[in-house]
Image: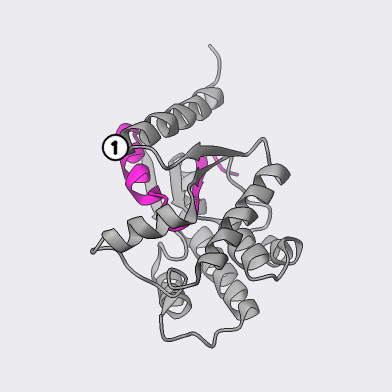
Amino acid sequence: MKNGTFITFEGPDGAGKTTIINMVADRLTNVLVTREPGGIDIAEQIRRVILAKENTAMDPRTEALLYAAARRQHLMEKVKPALAAGKVVLCDRFVDSSLAYQGYARGLGIDEVWKINQFAIEKMMPELTIYFDIEPELGLKRINKNKGREINRLDLENLEFHHKVRQGYQQLMERFPTRIVAIDASGSVAEVFKQTIELVEANLADKKPSL
């Protein structure tokens, strides 16, 4: 049983998720910040395989299965224990990324990738998912300007692929309208943070027992 709160952050590359997550964490107590794929040693090893720029021959189904494997290990080793300890878990990407990237943009099918991940996560889903929406052109421009950011295999996909990722997220918002809330990520960091922290704090307030 989980006593904490599980909140995930999604969006196309260059949406600014990592910056905002860290700002949100600074405002909260008893919080754990983590990411996918990665977060723990085994999942970070899988991440390096998935995102290595030289692995251009990787089959889309292999990619989807590797993400699910990393997700499972991360969930069991880090997320579930933190939730059991009552922490607020802020995760940079979760299952929705696989549905948008591999399910929709890679053409595997959202339902098919969802089935793979159901086996991995065993119905463990976040209470809230904040989706940072941004035009792919602007997101990629931000990536290219950020010299210190990791450039991985998915960043190097063509513009059409990144547009499909955004379309995939839009479909997910239609499927899960009560869980996924969109924020316009094209604004300033201050504007995006204000909207994000309001959503997070409202979610946490709803979970507090009434006196």
Q: Quadrant of residue 121?
A: bottom right
Q: Position of residue 170 (x, y in %)?
A: 64, 48
In-front residue for pair 119/103: 103
1 to 113, vertically: above or below = above
Outermost top residue: 211
Q: Nearer the viewer, residue 12 or 130?
A: 12
SS at badge 1:
helix
Q: Does residue 191 show up magenta in the picture?
A: no
Q: Is residue 167 left or right of residue 185?
A: right
Point out the stretch of residues depicted in magenta. 1-29
Q: Residue at x 37, y 44 (%)?
A: 21
Residue closer to the observer: 3 or 6: 6
**Which class describes the residues within 10 Å of circle 1: few (<14), some (14-19), or many (20+)?**
few
Estimate the x, y position of residue 211 in percent, counting from the top left. Answer: 53, 11
What's the residue at 53%, 59% (across, down)? 75
Q: Residue 137 falls in which quadrant of the image?
A: bottom left
Protein image colouring: one colour
**Quarter of the image where one finds residue 42:** bottom left
Taking the image as shown, residue 116 lies to the left or right of residue 131, namely right
- Quadrant of the snapshot with the N terminus: top right
Residue 8 falls within the magenta-colored stretch: yes
Point out residue 110 in the picture as x, y percentages from the top left corner. Answer: 71, 61
Q: Is residue 4 visible?
A: no
Residue holding disc 1 = 26
Q: Which amino acid does the dot numbered 1 rest on?
A: Asp
Q: Position of residue 116 (x, y in %)?
A: 69, 67
In the rendered image, the vertical position of residue 106 relative to residue 8, given as above or below: below
